[in-house]
Image (cartoon, rainbow, N blue to C red):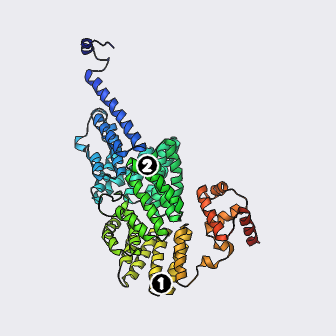
Amino acid sequence: MTTDRSSTRTAPPERGRTREEGAGSVVVDRGRLELARGRRQLSDGPVDDARESLLLAASLLAADAPELAEAARMSAAEAAWAAGDIAACLGALDGEDAADAPSGPGWARDAFLQDHRDGMRALLARRPEHAVGPLRRVLDRARTDDRPERLLRAASAALLLGDLREARAAGARALAAARNADCAASEARALEYLAYGELRAGRHAQARAHAEEGVRAALAAGHRNTAASHHAMLALAASIEGDTGAVEGYAATALAVARRHGLAQAATLAEWAVARADLARGRPLDAADRLGPLVGQGARRGHFAVWMLAVPCFVEAAVLAGHPEDARTVVGDLALWAAFGADPHAPAQLARCRALLASGDRADALYLRALALHDEAGGDFERARTELLYGRWLRRRRRLREARGRLGAALVGFERCGAAAWADQTRAELRANGAASRTEQAAGLARLTPQQLRVARYVAEGATNREVAQRLAVSTRTVDYHLRNVFAALGVRSRIELALMVGQEDR
Protein backbone atom coordinates (compact mmCIF):
# COMPACT_ATOMS: atom_id res chain seq x y z
CA MET A 1 0.00 0.00 0.00
CA THR A 2 1.41 3.40 -1.03
CA THR A 3 2.22 6.03 1.57
CA ASP A 4 1.23 8.96 -0.72
CA ARG A 5 -1.80 10.65 0.90
CA SER A 6 -3.45 11.72 -2.32
CA SER A 7 -3.22 8.26 -3.79
CA THR A 8 -4.59 6.87 -0.56
CA ARG A 9 -7.60 9.16 -0.82
CA THR A 10 -8.36 8.27 -4.42
CA ALA A 11 -7.50 4.58 -4.32
CA PRO A 12 -10.45 2.43 -5.44
CA PRO A 13 -12.18 0.27 -2.86
CA GLU A 14 -11.32 -3.41 -2.61
CA ARG A 15 -13.07 -5.59 -5.15
CA GLY A 16 -16.62 -6.36 -4.08
CA ARG A 17 -16.54 -3.95 -1.12
CA THR A 18 -17.49 -0.27 -0.91
CA ARG A 19 -15.64 2.17 1.32
CA GLU A 20 -18.60 2.08 3.70
CA GLU A 21 -18.47 -1.71 3.83
CA GLY A 22 -14.72 -1.58 4.46
CA ALA A 23 -15.26 0.80 7.38
CA GLY A 24 -17.97 -1.46 8.72
CA SER A 25 -15.62 -4.41 8.54
CA VAL A 26 -13.05 -2.54 10.61
CA VAL A 27 -15.69 -1.74 13.23
CA VAL A 28 -16.87 -5.35 13.33
CA ASP A 29 -13.31 -6.61 13.68
CA ARG A 30 -12.75 -4.26 16.58
CA GLY A 31 -16.04 -5.38 18.10
CA ARG A 32 -14.98 -9.00 17.85
CA LEU A 33 -11.70 -8.19 19.58
CA GLU A 34 -13.54 -6.43 22.42
CA LEU A 35 -15.95 -9.35 22.71
CA ALA A 36 -13.05 -11.81 22.98
CA ARG A 37 -11.30 -9.56 25.50
CA GLY A 38 -14.44 -9.20 27.59
CA ARG A 39 -15.06 -12.92 27.68
CA ARG A 40 -11.48 -13.57 28.78
CA GLN A 41 -11.84 -11.00 31.57
CA LEU A 42 -15.18 -12.51 32.60
CA SER A 43 -13.49 -15.86 33.16
CA ASP A 44 -10.12 -14.70 34.51
CA GLY A 45 -10.11 -11.03 35.39
CA PRO A 46 -11.98 -8.15 37.04
CA VAL A 47 -15.62 -8.52 36.04
CA ASP A 48 -16.19 -4.74 35.93
CA ASP A 49 -13.51 -4.50 33.24
CA ALA A 50 -15.17 -7.40 31.45
CA ARG A 51 -18.52 -5.62 31.46
CA GLU A 52 -17.02 -2.46 29.94
CA SER A 53 -15.35 -4.43 27.14
CA LEU A 54 -18.51 -6.38 26.43
CA LEU A 55 -20.72 -3.31 26.31
CA LEU A 56 -18.26 -1.67 23.94
CA ALA A 57 -18.35 -4.81 21.82
CA ALA A 58 -22.14 -4.70 21.73
CA SER A 59 -22.08 -1.10 20.59
CA LEU A 60 -19.54 -1.78 17.84
CA LEU A 61 -21.33 -4.90 16.60
CA ALA A 62 -24.93 -3.65 16.78
CA ALA A 63 -25.20 -2.42 13.18
CA ASP A 64 -23.41 -5.15 11.24
CA ALA A 65 -23.40 -8.19 13.56
CA PRO A 66 -26.53 -7.95 15.72
CA GLU A 67 -26.35 -11.61 16.78
CA LEU A 68 -22.90 -11.05 18.26
CA ALA A 69 -24.04 -7.77 19.79
CA GLU A 70 -26.84 -9.56 21.58
CA ALA A 71 -24.44 -12.22 22.86
CA ALA A 72 -22.11 -9.48 24.09
CA ARG A 73 -24.89 -7.79 26.03
CA MET A 74 -25.91 -11.04 27.68
CA SER A 75 -22.30 -11.64 28.68
CA ALA A 76 -22.13 -8.08 30.03
CA ALA A 77 -25.20 -8.85 32.14
CA GLU A 78 -23.43 -11.97 33.44
CA ALA A 79 -20.45 -9.83 34.44
CA ALA A 80 -22.69 -7.38 36.28
CA TRP A 81 -24.46 -10.31 37.96
CA ALA A 82 -21.17 -11.74 39.18
CA ALA A 83 -20.30 -8.32 40.61
CA GLY A 84 -23.67 -8.04 42.36
CA ASP A 85 -24.56 -4.80 40.55
CA ILE A 86 -28.31 -4.87 39.88
CA ALA A 87 -28.37 -1.49 38.09
CA ALA A 88 -25.54 -2.48 35.76
CA CYS A 89 -27.18 -5.83 35.08
CA LEU A 90 -30.45 -4.16 34.15
CA GLY A 91 -28.54 -1.64 32.05
CA ALA A 92 -26.92 -4.41 30.03
CA LEU A 93 -30.22 -6.21 29.59
CA ASP A 94 -32.14 -3.06 28.64
CA GLY A 95 -29.55 -1.70 26.24
CA GLU A 96 -31.12 -3.22 23.16
CA ASP A 97 -34.93 -3.10 23.30
CA ALA A 98 -36.90 -5.24 20.92
CA ALA A 99 -38.39 -2.21 19.21
CA ASP A 100 -34.94 -0.83 18.40
CA ALA A 101 -33.38 -4.11 17.34
CA PRO A 102 -31.72 -4.25 13.92
CA SER A 103 -33.76 -5.92 11.23
CA GLY A 104 -31.13 -6.65 8.62
CA PRO A 105 -31.60 -9.42 6.06
CA GLY A 106 -31.33 -12.92 7.44
CA TRP A 107 -31.51 -11.93 11.11
CA ALA A 108 -34.31 -12.09 13.60
CA ARG A 109 -34.07 -11.66 17.35
CA ASP A 110 -33.22 -14.92 19.09
CA ALA A 111 -36.37 -15.95 20.99
CA PHE A 112 -34.40 -18.14 23.41
CA LEU A 113 -32.07 -15.32 24.45
CA GLN A 114 -34.95 -12.85 24.52
CA ASP A 115 -36.91 -15.01 26.96
CA HIS A 116 -33.86 -15.51 29.16
CA ARG A 117 -33.23 -11.77 29.12
CA ASP A 118 -36.88 -10.92 29.89
CA GLY A 119 -36.97 -13.38 32.78
CA MET A 120 -33.79 -12.00 34.33
CA ARG A 121 -34.97 -8.43 33.84
CA ALA A 122 -38.28 -9.15 35.58
CA LEU A 123 -36.59 -10.77 38.57
CA LEU A 124 -34.08 -7.95 38.94
CA ALA A 125 -36.92 -5.44 38.77
CA ARG A 126 -38.71 -7.39 41.55
CA ARG A 127 -41.56 -8.49 39.32
CA PRO A 128 -41.34 -12.27 39.73
CA GLU A 129 -44.80 -12.82 38.31
CA HIS A 130 -43.47 -11.56 34.96
CA ALA A 131 -40.39 -13.82 35.11
CA VAL A 132 -42.07 -17.22 35.26
CA GLY A 133 -43.43 -17.33 31.71
CA PRO A 134 -40.21 -16.37 29.88
CA LEU A 135 -38.01 -18.58 32.02
CA ARG A 136 -40.34 -21.55 31.57
CA ARG A 137 -40.13 -21.04 27.80
CA VAL A 138 -36.34 -21.15 28.11
CA LEU A 139 -36.61 -24.54 29.78
CA ASP A 140 -39.06 -25.81 27.17
CA ARG A 141 -36.85 -24.76 24.25
CA ALA A 142 -33.72 -26.23 25.84
CA ARG A 143 -35.25 -29.72 25.92
CA THR A 144 -34.63 -30.08 22.18
CA ASP A 145 -31.26 -28.30 22.15
CA ASP A 146 -27.83 -29.85 22.57
CA ARG A 147 -25.63 -26.73 22.59
CA PRO A 148 -23.76 -26.36 25.89
CA GLU A 149 -24.29 -22.59 26.07
CA ARG A 150 -28.07 -22.92 25.67
CA LEU A 151 -28.23 -25.72 28.23
CA LEU A 152 -26.21 -23.63 30.69
CA ARG A 153 -28.71 -20.79 30.32
CA ALA A 154 -31.52 -23.29 30.89
CA ALA A 155 -29.86 -24.48 34.09
CA SER A 156 -29.56 -20.84 35.16
CA ALA A 157 -33.24 -20.24 34.41
CA ALA A 158 -34.27 -23.29 36.44
CA LEU A 159 -32.21 -22.10 39.43
CA LEU A 160 -33.80 -18.66 39.19
CA LEU A 161 -37.21 -20.34 39.34
CA GLY A 162 -36.17 -22.64 42.17
CA ASP A 163 -36.87 -25.70 40.02
CA LEU A 164 -33.96 -27.80 41.23
CA ARG A 165 -34.99 -30.93 39.32
CA GLU A 166 -34.95 -29.05 36.01
CA ALA A 167 -31.68 -27.37 36.99
CA ARG A 168 -30.09 -30.75 37.61
CA ALA A 169 -31.38 -32.13 34.30
CA ALA A 170 -30.22 -29.15 32.25
CA GLY A 171 -26.89 -29.03 34.06
CA ALA A 172 -26.29 -32.74 33.44
CA ARG A 173 -27.07 -32.35 29.74
CA ALA A 174 -24.80 -29.29 29.53
CA LEU A 175 -22.03 -31.27 31.19
CA ALA A 176 -22.40 -34.15 28.74
CA ALA A 177 -22.46 -31.77 25.78
CA ALA A 178 -19.39 -29.91 27.04
CA ARG A 179 -17.47 -33.16 27.48
CA ASN A 180 -18.49 -34.36 24.03
CA ALA A 181 -17.15 -31.08 22.65
CA ASP A 182 -14.01 -31.38 24.82
CA CYS A 183 -14.69 -27.87 26.18
CA ALA A 184 -13.22 -27.55 29.69
CA ALA A 185 -14.66 -24.05 30.15
CA SER A 186 -18.25 -25.14 29.55
CA GLU A 187 -17.64 -28.27 31.62
CA ALA A 188 -16.53 -26.12 34.57
CA ARG A 189 -19.59 -23.89 34.29
CA ALA A 190 -21.94 -26.88 34.03
CA LEU A 191 -20.39 -28.36 37.16
CA GLU A 192 -20.84 -24.98 38.87
CA TYR A 193 -24.58 -25.02 38.21
CA LEU A 194 -24.82 -28.66 39.28
CA ALA A 195 -22.90 -28.02 42.52
CA TYR A 196 -24.97 -24.96 43.36
CA GLY A 197 -28.21 -26.80 42.65
CA GLU A 198 -27.21 -29.70 44.91
CA LEU A 199 -26.31 -27.27 47.70
CA ARG A 200 -29.70 -25.59 47.33
CA ALA A 201 -31.34 -29.04 47.50
CA GLY A 202 -29.44 -29.92 50.68
CA ARG A 203 -27.25 -32.61 49.11
CA HIS A 204 -23.84 -31.33 50.10
CA ALA A 205 -21.91 -34.55 49.37
CA GLN A 206 -23.02 -34.46 45.72
CA ALA A 207 -22.29 -30.73 45.59
CA ARG A 208 -18.79 -31.32 46.88
CA ALA A 209 -18.11 -33.99 44.25
CA HIS A 210 -19.25 -31.65 41.43
CA ALA A 211 -17.23 -28.75 42.83
CA GLU A 212 -14.06 -30.82 43.11
CA GLU A 213 -14.39 -31.75 39.45
CA GLY A 214 -15.28 -28.17 38.62
CA VAL A 215 -12.10 -26.77 40.16
CA ARG A 216 -10.00 -29.08 38.02
CA ALA A 217 -11.91 -28.22 34.83
CA ALA A 218 -11.87 -24.47 35.53
CA LEU A 219 -8.13 -24.37 36.21
CA ALA A 220 -7.47 -26.49 33.13
CA ALA A 221 -9.35 -23.88 31.09
CA GLY A 222 -7.59 -20.99 32.83
CA HIS A 223 -10.89 -19.76 34.32
CA ARG A 224 -9.91 -18.64 37.80
CA ASN A 225 -13.21 -16.85 38.41
CA THR A 226 -15.16 -20.08 37.90
CA ALA A 227 -12.63 -21.91 40.09
CA ALA A 228 -13.26 -19.33 42.85
CA SER A 229 -16.98 -20.10 42.73
CA HIS A 230 -16.25 -23.80 43.06
CA HIS A 231 -13.92 -23.18 46.01
CA ALA A 232 -16.70 -21.20 47.72
CA MET A 233 -19.08 -24.13 47.28
CA LEU A 234 -16.46 -26.53 48.62
CA ALA A 235 -16.22 -24.30 51.68
CA LEU A 236 -19.99 -24.49 52.13
CA ALA A 237 -19.96 -28.28 51.87
CA ALA A 238 -17.11 -28.49 54.38
CA SER A 239 -19.00 -26.21 56.78
CA ILE A 240 -21.71 -28.87 56.98
CA GLU A 241 -19.18 -31.65 57.52
CA GLY A 242 -17.45 -29.69 60.28
CA ASP A 243 -14.00 -29.78 58.70
CA THR A 244 -12.82 -26.39 59.96
CA GLY A 245 -9.44 -26.51 58.25
CA ALA A 246 -11.02 -27.30 54.90
CA VAL A 247 -13.58 -24.49 55.30
CA GLU A 248 -10.89 -21.93 56.03
CA GLY A 249 -8.66 -23.16 53.20
CA TYR A 250 -11.37 -23.23 50.55
CA ALA A 251 -12.84 -19.90 51.68
CA ALA A 252 -9.46 -18.18 51.66
CA THR A 253 -8.76 -19.44 48.14
CA ALA A 254 -12.16 -18.26 46.91
CA LEU A 255 -11.90 -14.86 48.60
CA ALA A 256 -8.39 -14.17 47.28
CA VAL A 257 -9.73 -14.22 43.72
CA ALA A 258 -13.21 -12.89 44.50
CA ARG A 259 -11.97 -9.73 46.17
CA ARG A 260 -9.40 -9.03 43.48
CA HIS A 261 -11.79 -9.58 40.60
CA GLY A 262 -15.00 -8.23 42.15
CA LEU A 263 -16.86 -11.55 42.40
CA ALA A 264 -19.54 -10.61 44.91
CA GLN A 265 -21.46 -13.87 44.64
CA ALA A 266 -18.43 -16.11 45.32
CA ALA A 267 -17.34 -13.83 48.18
CA THR A 268 -20.77 -13.99 49.83
CA LEU A 269 -20.88 -17.78 49.65
CA ALA A 270 -17.36 -18.07 51.10
CA GLU A 271 -18.11 -15.70 53.99
CA TRP A 272 -21.32 -17.58 54.73
CA ALA A 273 -19.37 -20.86 54.83
CA VAL A 274 -16.93 -19.52 57.42
CA ALA A 275 -19.79 -18.20 59.55
CA ARG A 276 -21.67 -21.50 59.36
CA ALA A 277 -18.52 -23.32 60.49
CA ASP A 278 -18.34 -20.95 63.48
CA LEU A 279 -21.95 -21.78 64.30
CA ALA A 280 -21.24 -25.51 64.04
CA ARG A 281 -18.36 -25.14 66.52
CA GLY A 282 -20.60 -23.39 69.05
CA ARG A 283 -19.34 -19.87 68.34
CA PRO A 284 -22.58 -18.01 67.55
CA LEU A 285 -21.22 -14.55 68.37
CA ASP A 286 -18.44 -14.91 65.78
CA ALA A 287 -20.98 -16.20 63.25
CA ALA A 288 -23.36 -13.31 63.92
CA ASP A 289 -20.57 -10.74 63.62
CA ARG A 290 -19.56 -12.14 60.23
CA LEU A 291 -23.09 -12.55 58.87
CA GLY A 292 -24.56 -9.29 60.14
CA PRO A 293 -23.11 -7.07 57.39
CA LEU A 294 -23.95 -9.67 54.71
CA VAL A 295 -27.67 -9.76 55.51
CA GLY A 296 -28.18 -6.20 56.74
CA GLN A 297 -28.81 -2.98 54.88
CA GLY A 298 -25.87 -1.04 53.50
CA ALA A 299 -22.90 -1.25 51.16
CA ARG A 300 -21.54 -4.43 52.74
CA ARG A 301 -24.67 -6.50 52.08
CA GLY A 302 -23.90 -9.72 50.24
CA HIS A 303 -24.74 -10.57 46.65
CA PHE A 304 -28.40 -9.93 45.86
CA ALA A 305 -29.01 -13.48 44.62
CA VAL A 306 -27.58 -15.35 47.62
CA TRP A 307 -27.50 -13.17 50.76
CA MET A 308 -30.99 -14.32 51.64
CA LEU A 309 -29.77 -17.92 51.88
CA ALA A 310 -27.60 -16.90 54.85
CA VAL A 311 -30.43 -15.27 56.81
CA PRO A 312 -31.49 -18.44 58.72
CA CYS A 313 -27.89 -18.88 59.92
CA PHE A 314 -27.77 -15.26 61.04
CA VAL A 315 -31.06 -15.49 62.94
CA GLU A 316 -29.88 -18.63 64.73
CA ALA A 317 -26.48 -17.11 65.52
CA ALA A 318 -27.94 -13.84 66.80
CA VAL A 319 -30.47 -15.58 69.06
CA LEU A 320 -27.89 -18.01 70.46
CA ALA A 321 -25.51 -15.10 71.05
CA GLY A 322 -28.19 -13.32 73.08
CA HIS A 323 -29.06 -10.61 70.54
CA PRO A 324 -32.48 -11.58 69.15
CA GLU A 325 -33.32 -7.95 68.41
CA ASP A 326 -30.65 -7.95 65.69
CA ALA A 327 -32.43 -10.80 63.93
CA ARG A 328 -36.00 -9.50 63.88
CA THR A 329 -35.43 -6.99 61.09
CA VAL A 330 -34.39 -9.62 58.52
CA VAL A 331 -37.18 -12.14 59.15
CA GLY A 332 -39.55 -10.01 57.07
CA ASP A 333 -37.13 -10.25 54.14
CA LEU A 334 -36.97 -14.02 54.62
CA ALA A 335 -40.78 -14.18 54.53
CA LEU A 336 -40.82 -12.44 51.13
CA TRP A 337 -38.16 -14.80 49.86
CA ALA A 338 -40.07 -17.87 51.08
CA ALA A 339 -43.26 -16.62 49.41
CA PHE A 340 -41.50 -16.34 46.04
CA GLY A 341 -40.96 -20.11 46.01
CA ALA A 342 -37.44 -20.22 44.57
CA ASP A 343 -35.98 -22.00 47.60
CA PRO A 344 -37.59 -25.28 48.73
CA HIS A 345 -36.11 -24.98 52.23
CA ALA A 346 -37.11 -21.36 52.87
CA PRO A 347 -40.64 -21.97 54.28
CA ALA A 348 -39.34 -24.43 56.89
CA GLN A 349 -36.40 -22.15 57.72
CA LEU A 350 -38.79 -19.22 58.12
CA ALA A 351 -40.91 -21.18 60.61
CA ARG A 352 -37.74 -22.17 62.49
CA CYS A 353 -36.56 -18.55 62.64
CA ARG A 354 -39.94 -17.44 63.94
CA ALA A 355 -39.78 -20.19 66.57
CA LEU A 356 -36.36 -18.95 67.70
CA LEU A 357 -37.78 -15.45 68.14
CA ALA A 358 -41.15 -16.47 69.59
CA SER A 359 -42.11 -15.76 73.17
CA GLY A 360 -43.64 -18.31 75.55
CA ASP A 361 -45.11 -21.49 74.17
CA ARG A 362 -45.75 -20.08 70.68
CA ALA A 363 -42.41 -21.60 69.66
CA ASP A 364 -43.76 -25.12 70.15
CA ALA A 365 -46.25 -24.89 67.30
CA LEU A 366 -43.74 -23.09 65.08
CA TYR A 367 -41.11 -25.79 65.51
CA LEU A 368 -43.70 -28.45 64.66
CA ARG A 369 -44.75 -26.41 61.64
CA ALA A 370 -41.11 -26.19 60.52
CA LEU A 371 -40.66 -29.94 60.83
CA ALA A 372 -43.78 -30.59 58.75
CA LEU A 373 -42.42 -28.27 56.05
CA HIS A 374 -39.06 -30.05 56.15
CA ASP A 375 -40.91 -33.26 55.34
CA GLU A 376 -42.14 -31.62 52.14
CA ALA A 377 -38.76 -30.17 51.15
CA GLY A 378 -36.58 -33.15 52.07
CA GLY A 379 -32.94 -33.01 53.12
CA ASP A 380 -31.41 -34.34 56.33
CA PHE A 381 -29.25 -31.37 57.33
CA GLU A 382 -31.84 -28.60 57.62
CA ARG A 383 -34.34 -30.87 59.34
CA ALA A 384 -31.68 -32.01 61.83
CA ARG A 385 -30.87 -28.38 62.63
CA THR A 386 -34.51 -27.73 63.44
CA GLU A 387 -34.69 -30.89 65.57
CA LEU A 388 -31.57 -29.77 67.47
CA LEU A 389 -32.96 -26.30 68.20
CA TYR A 390 -36.35 -27.72 69.15
CA GLY A 391 -34.73 -30.29 71.44
CA ARG A 392 -32.66 -27.58 73.10
CA TRP A 393 -35.80 -25.47 73.61
CA LEU A 394 -37.65 -28.46 75.13
CA ARG A 395 -34.76 -29.30 77.45
CA ARG A 396 -34.66 -25.81 78.86
CA ARG A 397 -38.34 -26.14 79.69
CA ARG A 398 -37.65 -29.43 81.49
CA ARG A 399 -39.62 -31.47 78.96
CA LEU A 400 -36.80 -33.97 79.04
CA ARG A 401 -38.43 -36.99 77.43
CA GLU A 402 -39.61 -34.94 74.44
CA ALA A 403 -36.21 -33.29 74.24
CA ARG A 404 -34.50 -36.68 74.17
CA GLY A 405 -36.61 -37.75 71.20
CA ARG A 406 -35.91 -34.58 69.22
CA LEU A 407 -32.19 -34.60 69.98
CA GLY A 408 -31.94 -38.28 69.07
CA ALA A 409 -33.60 -37.57 65.73
CA ALA A 410 -31.22 -34.66 65.16
CA LEU A 411 -28.22 -36.87 65.85
CA VAL A 412 -29.40 -39.49 63.37
CA GLY A 413 -29.90 -36.79 60.71
CA PHE A 414 -26.50 -35.22 61.25
CA GLU A 415 -24.74 -38.58 61.20
CA ARG A 416 -26.59 -39.60 58.06
CA CYS A 417 -25.33 -36.57 56.14
CA GLY A 418 -21.84 -36.56 57.66
CA ALA A 419 -22.27 -33.32 59.66
CA ALA A 420 -19.71 -34.23 62.32
CA ALA A 421 -19.44 -30.92 64.20
CA TRP A 422 -23.22 -30.56 64.35
CA ALA A 423 -23.49 -34.13 65.62
CA ASP A 424 -21.00 -33.26 68.38
CA GLN A 425 -23.23 -30.32 69.41
CA THR A 426 -26.19 -32.68 69.58
CA ARG A 427 -24.32 -35.18 71.75
CA ALA A 428 -23.47 -32.36 74.15
CA GLU A 429 -27.17 -31.48 74.36
CA LEU A 430 -28.02 -35.12 75.02
CA ARG A 431 -25.50 -35.24 77.87
CA ALA A 432 -26.98 -32.04 79.30
CA ASN A 433 -30.38 -33.70 79.00
CA GLY A 434 -29.12 -36.53 81.24
CA ALA A 435 -28.86 -39.23 78.59
CA ALA A 436 -25.89 -40.61 76.72
CA SER A 437 -26.38 -40.75 72.99
CA ARG A 438 -26.68 -44.11 71.30
CA THR A 439 -23.27 -43.50 69.72
CA GLU A 440 -21.64 -43.04 73.11
CA GLN A 441 -23.37 -46.14 74.46
CA ALA A 442 -22.24 -48.28 71.55
CA ALA A 443 -18.98 -50.18 71.45
CA GLY A 444 -16.60 -51.06 68.66
CA LEU A 445 -17.79 -50.71 65.07
CA ALA A 446 -21.28 -49.77 66.27
CA ARG A 447 -19.84 -46.32 66.98
CA LEU A 448 -19.43 -45.69 63.26
CA THR A 449 -21.87 -44.13 60.83
CA PRO A 450 -22.84 -46.29 57.83
CA GLN A 451 -20.41 -44.46 55.52
CA GLN A 452 -17.60 -44.68 58.07
CA LEU A 453 -18.25 -48.39 58.47
CA ARG A 454 -18.01 -48.94 54.70
CA VAL A 455 -14.72 -47.05 54.60
CA ALA A 456 -13.39 -49.03 57.59
CA ARG A 457 -14.23 -52.39 56.04
CA TYR A 458 -12.65 -51.53 52.68
CA VAL A 459 -9.49 -50.26 54.38
CA ALA A 460 -9.36 -53.37 56.57
CA GLU A 461 -9.45 -55.45 53.38
CA GLY A 462 -6.29 -53.67 52.25
CA ALA A 463 -7.78 -51.09 49.84
CA THR A 464 -5.96 -47.79 49.37
CA ASN A 465 -7.82 -44.51 49.89
CA ARG A 466 -8.00 -44.04 46.12
CA GLU A 467 -9.50 -47.51 45.68
CA VAL A 468 -12.03 -46.84 48.43
CA ALA A 469 -12.96 -43.54 46.74
CA GLN A 470 -13.57 -45.34 43.44
CA ARG A 471 -15.76 -48.00 45.08
CA LEU A 472 -17.86 -45.43 46.94
CA ALA A 473 -17.90 -42.88 44.07
CA VAL A 474 -16.53 -40.12 46.29
CA SER A 475 -13.32 -38.10 46.36
CA THR A 476 -10.12 -39.26 48.05
CA ARG A 477 -10.40 -36.19 50.28
CA THR A 478 -13.76 -37.48 51.53
CA VAL A 479 -12.24 -40.89 52.26
CA ASP A 480 -9.39 -39.20 54.16
CA TYR A 481 -11.93 -37.26 56.21
CA HIS A 482 -14.00 -40.34 57.07
CA LEU A 483 -10.91 -42.40 57.88
CA ARG A 484 -9.66 -39.77 60.35
CA ASN A 485 -13.04 -39.92 62.08
CA VAL A 486 -12.94 -43.74 62.10
CA PHE A 487 -9.53 -43.71 63.79
CA ALA A 488 -10.76 -41.18 66.37
CA ALA A 489 -14.01 -43.05 67.09
CA LEU A 490 -12.33 -46.44 67.49
CA GLY A 491 -9.17 -45.24 69.22
CA VAL A 492 -6.84 -46.85 66.65
CA ARG A 493 -3.70 -45.30 65.23
CA SER A 494 -2.96 -47.29 62.09
CA ARG A 495 -4.56 -49.24 59.29
CA ILE A 496 -3.13 -52.43 60.80
CA GLU A 497 -4.88 -51.78 64.13
CA LEU A 498 -8.09 -51.01 62.25
CA ALA A 499 -7.85 -54.30 60.30
CA LEU A 500 -7.34 -56.24 63.55
CA MET A 501 -10.37 -54.60 65.18
CA VAL A 502 -12.59 -55.24 62.17
CA GLY A 503 -11.42 -58.87 62.05
CA GLN A 504 -12.12 -59.38 65.76
CA GLU A 505 -15.61 -57.88 65.57
CA ASP A 506 -16.50 -59.92 62.50
CA ARG A 507 -15.56 -63.20 64.19
Which secondary structure, mark 2?
helix
* Image quadrant where residue 103 sits: top left
* Nearest-to-viewer mark from 1 and 2: 2
Q: Where is residue 310 in the image (x, y as percent from the top left)?
A: 39, 64
The residue pinned by badge 2 equals 257
**Three-letter amino acid code of the residue under disc 2:** Val
Image quadrant in which the N terminus is located = top left
Which is more toward the observer, 288 or 180? 288
Write down the quadrant of residue 342 in the picture: bottom left
The image position of residue 34, as x and y in percent, is 35, 35
Hey, which residue is sitting farthest left in the picture? 99
Q: Would residue 348 be seen by someone viewing this image from the given angle?
A: no
Q: Earlier in the sequence, mark 1 or mark 2?
A: 2
Residue type at mark 1 is Arg
Within 10 angstroms of label 1, few (less than 14), some, or many (20 or more) residues?
many
The vertical placement of 150 against 500, above or below, is above
